[in-house]
Image (cartoon, helix red, strand yellow):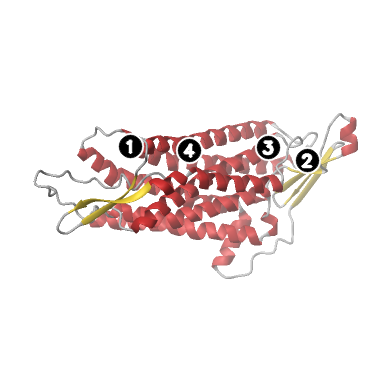
């Protein structure tokens, strides 16, 4: 997340007699808006928390789903769980009440954990895009191994923890307003350099939004171009089965990219405006803070709730097993496999339950000046069926 707490309350100006000329109410929203916000945030909290927990459980318990791509998916689900736990409840309360009322420790800890969760989530999406790009566009030349995937995930989490460390240091709880009935605290950033908070906000916007989005978009555009124009060499039988798997992958990845960009752009835009436009009158800032910020925050948090819905929509296995968990029945037995097989002089294609495997004939490939590194090269992930 961004420095949401500093901008959440507009504090009245002091008068000459050292008392505040305007009474600041404890609750900032009318009753009907409190009900609307509570329902809206409650829905995304339930979907983000329990949906992603269900995805983690299903993938960890289903051998068929334990692929490298799904390893990234599980880590993405963990990041979304952290967003739901550390972001959503406090964000709702901040949208309803003025000031910061959760103590000095949470003033430092919550912004830091929110930033780490979101940064890790975004970069995991980029890692998934890079993995799919290598698997589909460089099938025979490159393949990301489990060891490489685990190292990459570890680096993403470590980088996220280190990069957001300034928020852990510079967020502080400060009293800013006091009258007979109310002592108001804000959770604000106090940097040792001028405009440090604004510079860091731009840095986070570039590193945790612009760069990953450009990388993800570039990877998926190249994947789409390759998948739409490529057939397995010499394979003519069951091509429609392979084509369906290709289309399903493209649809899922494109939808994830679209939802990520749409969900986070309004929140970044609003906070950049509030941080850099200090000349606006108090009414305009009040309008942005009380009306646009809660909606933009809800939209950003909804991305964590949408992801498990996308997984279920595109994966019959995950969908069926989550239903089995909800109704407390035994999960379906994937004993009978849907299989297709076709072969040529140089390679064979084996389609089984959503997994497509190319097997290359090393001797004949060598005769054709090929340089394979493995007998079996996994092209598509089992996750998408």
Indicate left or right for 335 with 250 as reference.
right
Mark pair 4, 3: CA separation: 22 Å
Check the image and report above or below for 81 versus 279: below
- Coordinates of residue 228 in the picture (x, y in percent): 65, 33
Circle nearer the N terminus (2, 4)? 4
Query: Nearer the N terminus, badge 2 or badge 1?
Result: 2
- Considering only order in the chain, which callout, 3 or 2, is on the residue closer to the N terminus? 3
Give the label on residue 237, or none. 2
Report whether residue 164 is seen. yes
Q: Nearer the viewer, mark 2 or mark 1?
A: 1
Viewer-proximal residue among 102 and 373: 102
Between the C-alphas of marks 1 and 3, the distance is: 39 Å
Q: Name the residue located 30 percent from the left edge and 47 percent from the top edge.
A: 8
Foreground tag (1 vs 4): 1
Q: Residue at x 40, y 52 (%)?
A: 108
Residue 240: x and y in percent read 70, 41
Helix, strand or loop status at disc 1:
helix
Report which residue position mark 3 lands on: 134
Q: Is residue 1 left or right of residue 158?
A: left
Answer yes or no: do the residues labelled 1 and 4 have beta carbons within 8 Å? no
Q: Position of residue 270 (x, y in %)?
A: 35, 39
Q: Nearer the viewer, mark 2 or mark 3?
A: 3
Q: Which mark is residue 209?
A: 4
Please say whether residue 313 is visible from this viewpoint: no
* Residue highlighted by disc 1: 275
């Amino acid at each position: 997340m961004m420095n949401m707490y500093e901008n959440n309350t507009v504090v009245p100006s002091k008068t000459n007699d050292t008392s505040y000329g305007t009474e600041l109410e404890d609750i900032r929203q009318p009753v009907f808006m409190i009900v609307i916000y509570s329902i809206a945030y409650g829905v995304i909290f339930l979907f983000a928390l329990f949906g992603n927990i269900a995805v983690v459980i299903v993938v960890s318990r289903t051998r068929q789903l334990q692929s490298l791509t799904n390893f990234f998916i599980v880590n993405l689900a963990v990041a979304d769980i952290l967003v739901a736990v550390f972001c959503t409840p406090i964000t709702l309360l901040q949208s309803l009440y003025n000031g910061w009322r959760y103590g000095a420790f949470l003033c430092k800890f919550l912004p830091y954990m929110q930033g780490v969760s979101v940064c890790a989530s975004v970069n995991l999406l980029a890692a998934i895009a890079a993995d799919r790009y290598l698997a589909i566009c460089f099938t025979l030349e490159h393949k990301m191994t489990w060891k490489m995937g685990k190292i990459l995930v570890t680096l993403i989490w470590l980088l996220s923890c280190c990069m957001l460390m300034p928020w852990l240091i510079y967020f502080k709880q400060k009293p800013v307003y006091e009258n007979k009935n109310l002592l108001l605290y804000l959770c604000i950033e106090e940097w040792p350099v001028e405009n440090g908070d604004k510079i860091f906000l731009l840095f986070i916007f570039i590193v945790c939004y612009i760069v990953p989005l450009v990388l993800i978009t570039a990877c998926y555009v190249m994947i789409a171009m390759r998948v739409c124009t490529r057939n397995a060499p010499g394979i003519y039988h069951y091509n429609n089965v392979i084509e369906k798997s290709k289309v399903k992958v493209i649809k899922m990845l494109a939808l994830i990219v679209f939802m990520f960009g749409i969900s986070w752009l309004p929140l970044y835009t609003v906070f950049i405006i509030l941080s850099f436009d200090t000349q606006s009158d108090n009414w305009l800032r009040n309008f942005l803070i009380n009306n646009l910020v809660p909606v933009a925050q809800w939209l950003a948090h909804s991305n964590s709730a949408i992801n498990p819905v996308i997984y279920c929509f595109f994966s019959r296995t995950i969908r069926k097993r989550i239903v089995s968990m909800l109704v407390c029945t035994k999960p379906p037995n994937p004993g009978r496999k849907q299989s297709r097989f076709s072969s040529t002089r140089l390679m064979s294609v084996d389609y089984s339950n959503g997994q497509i495997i190319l097997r290359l004939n090393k001797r004949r490939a060598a005769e054709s000046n090929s340089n394979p590194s493995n007998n079996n090269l996994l092209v598509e992930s089992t996750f998408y069926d």
